Image: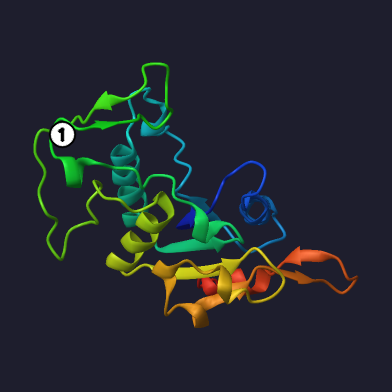
Amino acid sequence: MSKQVYISADYAPNDGDRDVVDEIHDWCKDPRRNLEFYDMSHPSRGSVSSDPDCRPCDLKKEFNQQINASSAVIFVVGDKTAQRTAGSLCRRNSDGAGCECTPYKQNTNGKATCKWYSTSTPGPNDDIGSINTYSYLEHEFRQAIRRKRNIVIVYNSMKCESEWLPSYMNGYEDYAHPFWTRNALGYRVGDYQYIKKALGYE
């Protein structure tokens, strides 16, 4: 049975955690595996990020929509996750209307004036507000908590690395699990059985 799952990870090209995401995607393509889901973090119809004037708040609003449409969220935690601050530089809360921000792609136009004339405080049953100083990764985690999604946390490691957990994941140490293990031949492989069970396929 196909599921809609959101994957949150550090996609930095040189020291991120893309290898974990690629492994999970390979499982989904393998007909021998009983793991079929659509990764909501990569929508087939495009993304607001294709807009040259896309702002961090636009991306966070899209993250909310994608997480809301998912039944589970996989959080990949690597050794750099706690240090990632991308998405946190929003001056609207402190400087008010008319402040400047840098579009997501940091295009040749440089900084631009905040596009929002007014803001409001989200209620307890609303999505996490998209105008905030959370990093993209923290925003995704807080939204998944707010919407009570099935949360799966894996370390990009062969052992538990609780010191890698960012502060906003405090209290979730017992939920985190190493993603990598060794097969019968001694090769490093993703822990397919763990992910399958965590997502509710058995």
User: Among all residues in the image, which is located at the extreme front?
Assistant: 95
Q: Residue at x 34, y 39 (%)?
A: 56
Query: Which amino acid, by three-letter code, is at mark 1?
Result: Trp
- Residue at 15% x, 66% y is 124
> SS of the residue at dot 1?
loop
On the image, the x and y values in percent for residue 172 come to 45, 77
Measuring from the top left, give residue 186's x and y in whole percent. Answer: 88, 71
Which residue lies most toward the right here?
185
Nearest the viewer among 178 and 149 is 178
Query: Who is closer to the viewer here, 160 or 184?
Result: 160
Residue 116 found in image quarter:
top left
> Which residue is identified by label 1?
116
Left or right: 78, with 100 as reference point: right
Q: Name the residue located 33 percent from the left edge and 68 percent from the top edge.
A: 145
Answer whether residue 143 is visible to the viewer in this image: yes
Which residue extends farthest top? 108
Q: Quadrant of residue 195?
A: bottom right
Q: Position of residue 21 (x, y in %)?
A: 61, 53
Q: Is residue 117 left or right of residue 91?
A: left
From the top left corner, tell me how far across and down residue 4 is, in percent.
Answer: 44, 56
Placement of 47 over or under 129, stated as above or below:
above
Q: Is residue 53 above or below residue 151?
A: above
How many labels were placed on the picture? 1
Q: From the viewer's perspective, is residue 125 above or below residue 100?
A: below
Q: Residue at x 35, y 55 (%)?
A: 139
In the image, 164 versus 44, the foreground residue is 164
Colour setting: rainbow
171 vs 55, left or right, is right
Quadrant containing the C terminus in the rendered view: bottom right
Any part of residue 70 in sight: no
